[in-house]
Image (cartoon, helix red, strand yellow):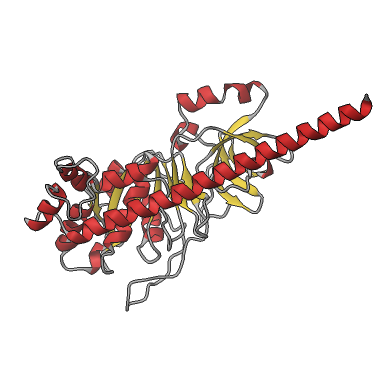
Amino acid sequence: MHSSQPLSSTFDLSSLGWDDSFAALFVEHAAVGLLPARVVRVDRGCCDTFTASGPVRADSGAVTSLDPAHTVCTGDWAALRPGSEPELVALLPRRSAITRASSDRTSHQQVLAANVDSVIIAVSLAAPLNAGRVERLLALAWDSGAKPVVVLTKADVVDDPGEALAAITDLAPGVDIVTTSSTTGAGLDVLSEVATGTAVLLGPSGAGKSTLANALIGREYMGTKEVRFSDGKGRHTTVHRELLPLPGGGVLIDTPGLRGIGLQDAADGIERVFSEIESYARDCAFGDCEHRSEPGCAVQEAIVVGMLDVGRLDRYRKLLRESERAAARGSARQSSKGSKTQKQITRDLRATYRFRDRQR
């Protein structure tokens, strides 16, 4: 593991997120001499991990899967076999996971981080607000079961963040919003209070994630780069997902900037993001109202009287369609996989029967 400062040789596992529920899941592993380890970083068939005795680099072949939804990921708790060649031999069930539809538009899901309590969504005040991207990240966060927190970064480069704060408040009902500056330190104490446990940092390149991570961990750990003045965009600074212990307890998982944020079977998260639309929809005259031109549509009435923005309704529909289509592809893949398995079982049985017949 790389670092500008040496890491502690030992760790209190509770400060890394270990608790009684994980301990109960680990009983059988402990009985055969395995050790709990939290995955820090996945890299080329190996994982950097933290154990009670300190950092350990271990082979991860046994917990690596071709399906990106089930392969080892940063934040996982694993059973480690100690020795001269440490090995991860099993993963504990995940309490939560940040997953997105894979960027290749297949039916697979990709896990970005596991066992997450808080999702910090970084939004730069130095760049134009992308409402759709914020809503996507919020849906991703809500659907994981973690608590989303929107962080407005780079407050020191704008005269008044009030307009952006008001816009984000409309996009993120029921979500804590914290205005910060990594340069001045403003808002960092508030962020530390609301983003508890294991926090994952999400956002596009140039949003100031690495600078924010450095400020939260109290040292220069993640590299930073300047962003283009023309559009506020930057190159990827973080190239791996990595788990970083925080000084006051808890951990932070930093992630590369996300260009594609596909949603799959995330209806629950989408409904949380667009809770006001869901609330209006309950008053529609028809239970299957599509909120277009149906009589008695409470959603369209809210648009007419200025209570709801038509652009937000369009984005709501778009995310639901995308999520449902991706989920349908996933169901089709599982059905196809099950069909292939059943066909193979049938072929094996027929081969067995033919063999028996020949022996008679």
Q: Farthest left residue? A: 305
Relative horizontal placement of residue 52, taking residue 157 as reference (left or right): right
Report if residue 217 is visible in the image.
no
Check the image and report above or below for 32 versus 54.
Answer: above
**Residue 281 on image: x %, y %:** 18, 44
Instruction: Say which residue appears at 65% left-offset and 29% top-offset.
Output: 34
Relative horizontal placement of residue 58, taking residue 359 as reference (left or right): left
Instruction: Say which residue appears at 32% left-offset and 75% top-offset.
Output: 231
Q: In the depicted view, which residue is nearer to us: 356 or 330?
A: 356
Check the image and report above or below for 131 versus 100.
Answer: below
Check the image and report above or below for 135 versus 118.
Answer: below
Q: In the depicted view, which residue is nearer to us: 98 or 17?
A: 98
Count of labels in the image: 0
**Residue 48 on image: x %, y %:** 59, 46
Q: In the depicted view, which residue is nearer to us: 167 or 252?
A: 167
Report if residue 210 is visible in the image.
yes
Quarter holding the C terminus is: top right
Check the image and report above or below for 228 versus 60.
Answer: below
Q: In the depicted view, which residue is nearer to us: 352 or 242?
A: 352
Q: Quadrant of residue 212?
A: bottom left
Instruction: Say which residue appears at 77% left-offset and 35% top-offset.
Output: 348
**Residue 286 on image: x %, y %:** 18, 42
Q: Quadrant of residue 130?
A: bottom left
Q: Farthest bottom residue? A: 230
Q: Farthest right residue? A: 359
Instruction: Say which residue appears at 22% left-offset and 57% top-offset.
Output: 312
**Residue 83 on image: x %, y %:** 72, 35
